[in-house]
Amino acid sequence: MNQKIYDDSYLVRQSAFAEIIWSINSKPANPWPEAGWISFPFNIKNPQFRLGRIGAVVNPATDFIKGSNHDYCFLNSGMAIIDSENQGFGIMSPDVPGVSLDRPGLWRYTPDFIPKKGNVFFNLYNNQWSANFTEWVEGSWNTRFYIWRIDEYSNEKSIITPSEEFRNPLLAEFSAGDPGELPASAEGISLSEKGLLITAFKKDKNGDLLRLWEQKGENVSCTISLPPGSNYRSAHLCNLRGEESGDKIAITNNKFKIAIKAYQPVTFILYE
């Protein structure tokens, strides 16, 4: 591994992030208990961790319930490791979500544990849960990791936005032939606030359904801009089943505004 990725000045001067690709070829199956890890030993004193989990960004030192699994957990997005001045690094993998902090955490149970060392272990494979998954791990595959510098920690800038950009990179395709009726380019839905995800925009039995999910943990007021040429006149709040459960909001010039609470999912049915 290139040692320069641990030099924060290198990350600032040369690139916004470092990409690391781990590969394995023709791994044989092994019936004995085994696990593979890749370790990122960050040189941060008194580290603090922030984990992008399903539903919230959490601090494992304060937010994990005693008696639960403190040794091994899954990320929904990415994570950060920072010092007392809110500086450090963000890291994520779009391929492997299982992590342990401080030391590898499989085949152990610690009901109350606070990580003290700046070590992040991503689990590459294991056969601990052979009843639910393939018991013997074998074959060839690649796994990607991304590391970026954090100058002043915040959930959105340090975890949510960079993780989503790595998980869902910009895609482009080339098509040859005569042009059709669709325009060469068109805008989609845009949001005035970063840190919100558009998790659904689709046809529904009652209309067109749009769902947002606040990820950075803040109460926000967001303006939603719908694609140009849309004929929507109103947005009706509904529950996760698509059933209307609130007042309608008028749509003017393809825009409407909504207040969203921290970590709240909100769903609308759009009517023309």
Image (spheres, grey):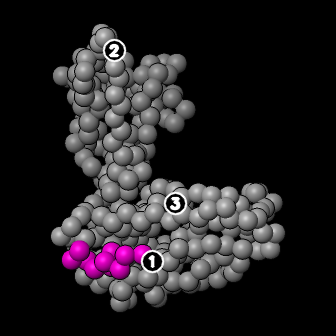
Check disc 2 and give the amino acid type: Gly
Q: Would you say 128 lies left or right of 253 here?
A: right
Mark 2 highlights which residue?
Answer: 177
State which region is magenta. Answer: 1-10
- Image check: 55 left or right of 157? right
Asked if one can make out residue 246 in the rendered structure from this viewpoint, the answer is no
C-alpha separation, residue under disc 1 versus residue under disc 2: 48 Å
Q: In the image, is 54 to the left or to the right of 175? A: right
Residue 86 x/y as whole percent: 27, 77
Which quadrant is home to the C terminus? top left
Residue appearing at x 35%, y 86% in the figure: 44
- Res. 171 mark: none
User: Which residue is nearer to you in this view: 117 or 177?
Assistant: 177
Q: At label 1, which amino acid type do we have?
A: Phe
Q: Which residue is mark 1?
A: 40
Q: Secondary structure at mark 1?
A: strand
Q: Quadrant of residue 142?
A: bottom right
**Of callouts 3 and 2, which one flags the residue occurring earlier in the amino acid sequence?**
3
Q: Amino acid at mark 3?
A: Thr
- Residue 108 counted in the magenta span: no
